[in-house]
Amino acid sequence: MILVTGGAGFIGSNFVIHAIKYGRHKIINLDKLTYAGNLETLRSISGHENYLFVHGDIGDEKLVSSLLEKHRPYAIINFAAESHVDRSIHGPRDFIQTNIVGTFNLLESVRGYYQSLDTHEKMQFRFLHVSTDEVYGTLEKNDPPFSESNPYEPNSPYAASKAASDHLVRAWHHTYGIPVLTTNCSNNYGPYQFPEKLIPLIIHNALNHKPLPIYGDGLQVRDWLYVEDHCEAIETVLLNGKIGETYNIGGNNEKTNLFVVETICQILDRLMPRQDQKSYAELITFVKDRLGHDRRYAINAKKISLELGWKPKETFETGIEKTIRWYLENSVWVNSILSGSYREWVAKQYGH
Ligand code: NAD
Ligand code: TYD
């Protein structure tokens, strides 16, 4: 039995769906169902005997403690977070509340639970905290990729809140002996990603003949990781990672944003040609840059590869084709999550 938090979001739902489908774990999914969480995503497993959904906040110590006492999981994977940099720039408060205060409360519930375990259960127990490469700050063009020993230099309110949560997790290990693992991964993409993040936003806008917004010059670099590769990495760290250690997870796919958007356009031109025969690339529009925009992220994933034998299976080329095909085949899912609040966000961020 694993307690997953934030399992109705993008990465958490991919993890939960695979874990249940392949019968690997029993899962309790605790999620607050913010704008980013959607039960529609979990419909295929909703009645499964190995799966239980609980609507709630990681910051609700009473609720979390009672869930731990009742279900006695051998592991907790903390995906729950506010996760969008642009939203953190418009309104950082929710990021401080969930990512820092929420993680603190969750750790306190875990501390109480861990103390109640017997020696054997204590040996088995793990708390895995899912974090981001953004805690390391930004890289220049020729800097080596981030390794686990890079200093923390977060630049956005989102990155700072995740950095703070990583420090809390570390301290709860050193001070209270909680057996923690932390993973810092690069930009994920794949099925079930909310269309506020670059890749699903571009696919969605292109299919609806809307402008494809590129911040600044579009030459910022991200290291793209296919979400199923990430989920496998998390499971690998959970089962074999060394307590107290952190593991960087990346896709070995450094691309500029402009390249990503142009690639999506080319694939859509082939899979879903426009009626007017023009390329989707015609819709590319350069817009005002993000405040404090980090120039480049890149991950050195040697540690997880050498110590735990994990490597990503997908290249950017294979992963992006799969992702686009998924969005083409799942327009019902996309439409089901595009509520009024999504439209409000788009108007706020991009004007009309
Ligand atoms: P997401 O925004 O898609 O989903 C977050 C989920 O957490 C949602 O279901 C939301 O309802 C839930 N949630 C938010 N606040 C909560 C609270 N207080 N209590 C319980 N549930 C709450 O995020 P994601 O992209 O799936 O990211 C998952 C984790 O991975 C996050 O911790 C994020 O920082 C990290 N991460 C994501 C990426 C990426 O590219 N998406 C990259 C690096 C790290
Ligand atoms: P995003 O998906 O928000 O992830 P992150 O900020 O965590 O890296 O953005 C990925 C990159 O794409 C980032 O450099 C910002 C850029 N971007 C755009 O150029 N246009 C957009 O509309 C969005 C959402 C992002």
Image (spheres, grey):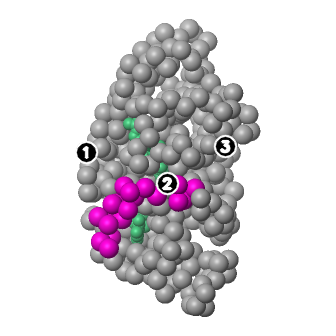
Label 2 – label 1 distance at C-alpha: 24 Å
Q: Which quarter of the picture shows residue 74?
A: top right
Q: Residue at x 44, y 23 (%)?
A: 64
Magenta stretch, main secondary structure, is helix
Q: Which residue is mark 3?
A: 44
Q: Quadrant of the C terminus?
A: bottom left
Amino acid type, label 3: Ser
Amino acid type, label 2: Ile
Q: Which stretch did the figure color magenta?
A: 333-352
Q: Is residue 8 above or below residue 206?
A: above
Q: Residue at x 58, y 47 (%)?
A: 41
Q: Which quarter of the picture shows residue 43?
A: top right
Q: Which residue is mark 1?
A: 93
Where residue 192 sits: x, y (%)?
56, 54
Q: Does residue 243 appear left or right of residue 221 in this picture?
A: right
Label 3 – label 1 distance at C-alpha: 34 Å
Q: Is residue 162 above or below residue 64?
A: below
Where residue 298 sits: x, y (%)?
48, 61
Relative to the observer, which residue lies in front, 222 or 33? 33
Q: Which residue is mark 2?
A: 337
